[in-house]
Image (spheres, rainbow, N blue to C red):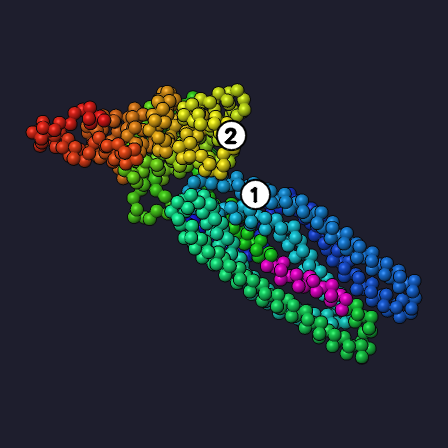
Amino acid sequence: MSSSPSAQNPSPSSTLSTPAALWRLKPFVKPVIWRLAGGAASALIAAIIALMIPIVLEQIISGPVYSGEISAIVWGAVAVFALGLGEALMVWLRRQFVLNPSTEVEYKMRTELYSRLQTLPVSFHDRWGSGQLLSRMMQDIGLIRRWLAFGLVLLVVNLLTIVIGSVLLFRWHWLLGTIFLVTAIPLWIRGYLFEKRYGALTRRSQDQAGDLATSVEESVHGIRVLKAFGRGKHALSRFSRQAETLRETEMSKAGAIASIWFWLDLMPQIAFGLSLMSGIWLISVDQIDEAQLFAFFAMAVVLRWPIESIGFLFSFMLDARTATDRVFDIFSETNTITDPEHPVHIENPRGELAFENAHFRYQDAGAHERDLLDGIDLVLRPGETMALVGLTGSGKTTLTTLPTRLYDVTGGRVTLDGVDVRDLPLAELRQHIAMAFEDATLFSATVRENVLLGRADLDVHSEEGERVLREALQVAQAAFVDSLPDGVETVIGEEGLSLSGGQRQRLALARAVAAAPKVLVLDDPLSALDVDTEALVEEALRHVLADTTAMIVAHRPSTVALADRVALLEAGRVTAVGTHSELLKTSRHYRHVISSLEAEEAARTGAIPIIRDEQLEVEDEVREGRRVEAADEDPITEKEVQR
């Protein structure tokens, strides 16, 4: 199972203070800052109105209530009602101010993060689990939105309310105000300790939730495999362990929150008790009167919610800080594959693809590990079809990722018509060079949209789009689409899993053909086809490739037959280039590779492999003049060698 690098190693953002970490949201918040400020102002006015009510009550009790003036009491009640109505109106206004801007921030962050994921190199996606990316895209950005709309505004307003209210408490007597301030000191100490513990737990929890999402996604996509091998219980067991680990972390978070809430509940109660005893004593010595003590406690009650909410809002802020860290872990990733600063354009590409001393190694490869591609020198002439053959691990698939810059060479260069592909704009490069992969990936869209994915220049529903679509489907022998419920307008299910492997491959091949590239890179795109369909596709491809430079990874002898020339790869190097017949005559390793391919093909189709290891040994000895007699007795003819 994949997990995010941040789940394994602390990210640089974890060293930032909480305000500094959240300040990174400024570019997204700046366009709506005034509306958020309007929401905060509305909330602050609501809080101030609430703080005015105890003062009005003091005046009512000390005046009309003591004097018994009924009309004055009524007007006092009307005043309190008006203040309450004004507070409610400000709360409603706060929501109107903040809800729309916060969703705009959410939308902007989500679209920019998606755009970032599209531009980051394949090496980034190799390291990150899809569940981690999904949890950041959906859960973390959603949490940031809720914090901006609710948590941030209320945290600022409630802190200001506490400060203003505490000052007003001194209005009645300095002793009562001092009691409230002194009893607040333990809250700040506990809050500081709480931030350190809860912040670490929140990050761990969100990373574990991302890993859990990755497991769910892997299980859903691999449900056929799990069912076929009866490994559902095994997957459940692994999922249960991960879920239990997440539960334990969530319980630790709950314990931390319970601890801070204990102090948030305890200290106000202590403050009330001490204030009550002090207030009674102050009344007895004529320092204050009953109306003032009543107003003091009314003010304390108003302050109780802001004080108690600080713990929740503080934890909410830490959750938002962690979510921000996780999102900016992606935004801060360095994109190593970008458009050149001074791009070069190829107006009319001829299609000459060349590898010049090309080296490649992954970033996390050890210092003593050899390069996966170790000095590749290979030239594909315009319009030529070149097959790549080699044993597993020789570097064939890796080589196919370099022309379109899915990965960049770590040494040497790849050129198109003599121009380094790194000097071409990415959009132009990928217009000239198209790929079809062995593992065909389709999208939840119509057949038409999947096949014409690479033709941004076409209206897919135009006559020209229809012509390109039909020609591509014909080349790929994908006539089966007409039998689908809605033909080419049939929406393919997630990743095309509703189709067979051969059907997916044919649509992926049609997509590459429809792109009409000057260079076509095919990574064994016919592996899932039956023999008859493969023959038809190969025949159609011969016509398509007549004017197109093609590099084909061959895992079947029949695929080699498509090629004008063949390049033999061994341990990341091209050791021989020539026609199929030439290499059979001159390269023992090539004959061994072809023999292996035939053996694999025989196992797949039930046929008998034509070239055997014993035959290869005999032929070598014949060529070296050591088995003339044996060769006369059991000759290997040129025809057999070619077969």
- Which mark's residue is nearer the viewer, 2 or 1? 2
Q: Earlier in the sequence, mark 2 or mark 1?
A: 1
On the rendered structure, is 602 left or right of 457? left
The dot on residue 193 is none
Give the residues in magenta. 297-315
Query: Which residue is nearer to you in this view: 374 or 74?
Result: 74
- For mark 1, does the 10 Å Cα neighbourhood hold few (<14), some (14 to 19), or many (20 or more) residues? some
Residue drawn at point x = 41 percent, y = 26 percent: 476
Residue drawn at point x = 23 percent, y = 26 percent: 643
Q: Quadrant of residue 406?
A: top left
On the rendered structure, is 370 left or right of 155? left
Q: Is residue 357 visible?
A: no
- For mark 2, does the 10 Å Cα neighbourhood hold few (<14), some (14 to 19), or many (20 or more) residues? few
- How many numbered callouts? 2
Q: Is residue 378 magenta?
A: no
| Helix, strand or loop status at disc 2 | loop
Is 627 located above or below residue 383 in the figure?
Answer: below
Name the residue carrying label 2: 485
The dot on residue 110 is 1
Q: Amino acid at mark 2?
A: Pro
Q: Position of residue 133 (x, y in %)?
A: 50, 46
Is 562 located above or below residue 225 in the figure?
Answer: above
